Each structure stands twice: as C-alpha cells, then as structure tokens.
Amino acid sequence: MSEEKTIQQTDAWFTLSGDVNSDMVHRVFEAVSGMSENGVETAHVLIQSNGGYVSDGLCLYNFLSNSPVKFVMYNAGAVASIAVILFLSGARRYASETARFMVHKSHATASPGARPDALNIIVEGLRADDARTESILRKHIELLPEQWAIHQYSDLHLTARDAKIARMINDVADFAPPKGVHIRNI
C-alpha cells in the first residue's frame, strides 16, 4: 500500500460553518464519533463562523483538544469571537491570505428596567467568561501589548499575516483537500 493511500485513509476533510451554539456542539459530537469509528486520525476542518455562545465554544475547544482525532483547523474567510477559541483547538492551524480573525471581550444585553442585583449577576458572568477565554488565548497566542490593549476595550481584528506573527496560525495556507477526497459538512 502506498504512503499516499495510507494518508487518504487516515486523513479526512470537513467544513464547519454557522453559529457556535448547542446545535453546532451536537453536530461536532456526532461527527467526531463517526471519525473515531471510521479510523480517522487527522481531521482537516475549514471553519467559517462569526461566533456565538461562550459556553458552547469552550465545550467544543475542550472536547476537540482532548479528542482521539488530531484536528487541523483552517480559516478561509472569517473566524470571530468565540469561534476563535474553537479554532485554537487545532493541533495545527492555517488561514488563507484573505482570511480574518476577530477577538473581543464578552458582552450581554440586560433587560430594560433590570435591577442592580440582576445587572451584577450579568457582569460577574461576563467576567468569568472573559477569564476562561483569555486564559485559552494566552496559552496559544502571543499578542503585542498594543493588541492586548485593543482587546481589553474593543474588537481586535487580525489578518492572516497578523495571526501568523501572533502564532495563532502555523502558516498562511489555503484549505486545499486533495483531488477526489470526500468533503463532509459537519
């Protein structure tokens, strides 16, 4: 059996798009179960997402980081907000030249007329979410002090080149499945 044939049997190619939410968590759980059962050792995943719910993104990060399948993540367009944490679960990570990343602090909208104690609960929840996501960011990427300062109060946008300098990605490269492979949407 040739080496190329072996790679094709243990590598698989996937796309994952949409909001990071409980539906995505369910789809990823099912897909990884199938990958494991089918002997997939390395899953190449193209992610396209503007974010979603913090807890769902953290769940996916922890699940994929500890999965028996090795994940290689790709950004060909936009990976933003909590989807960046999902992206960081990849053992290797790549982005197309025209891809962009965006990270920011958590935010929420309070109900009109919310009482101070209810607002306090929202603020504490946001602080807890920020602490969880920032610990993952700091584990994987090296931003400049100016970039951390922007992140503290605003949206931080990174090009593929910026992401490479920050070690968010291994290299600027496209999601390019080999000819003839089956590409599955998760």
Image (cartoon, rainbow, N blue to C red):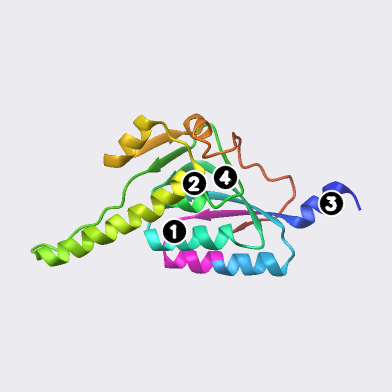
> Counting residues from the N terminus, which is met first, the one under dot 3 or under dot 4?
3
Is residue 48 a member of the stretch shown in magenta? no
Query: Where on the picture, by quarter, is residue 125?
Result: bottom left
Q: Nearer the viewer, mark 1 or mark 3?
A: 1
Q: Is residue 126 above or below residue 95?
A: below
Tag of residue 84? none
Q: Residue at x 39, y 41 (%)?
A: 102
> Counting residues from the N terminus, which is met first, the one under dot 1 or under dot 4?
1
Q: Amino acid at mark 1?
A: Gly
Q: Nearer the viewer, mark 3 or mark 2?
A: 2
Q: Nearer the viewer, residue 178 or 25?
A: 25
- x and y percentages locating residue 2 in the rendered image: 89, 49
Instruction: Check disc 3 and report its element: helix, strand or loop.
Output: helix
Q: Residues within 10 Å of mark 2 (few under 14, many from 20)?
A: few
Q: Residue at x 38, y 36 (%)?
A: 157
Q: Residues within 10 Å of mark 1 (few under 14, many from 20)?
A: many
Tag of residue 57? 1
> Would residue 129 be found to the left or right of residue 40 on screen?
left
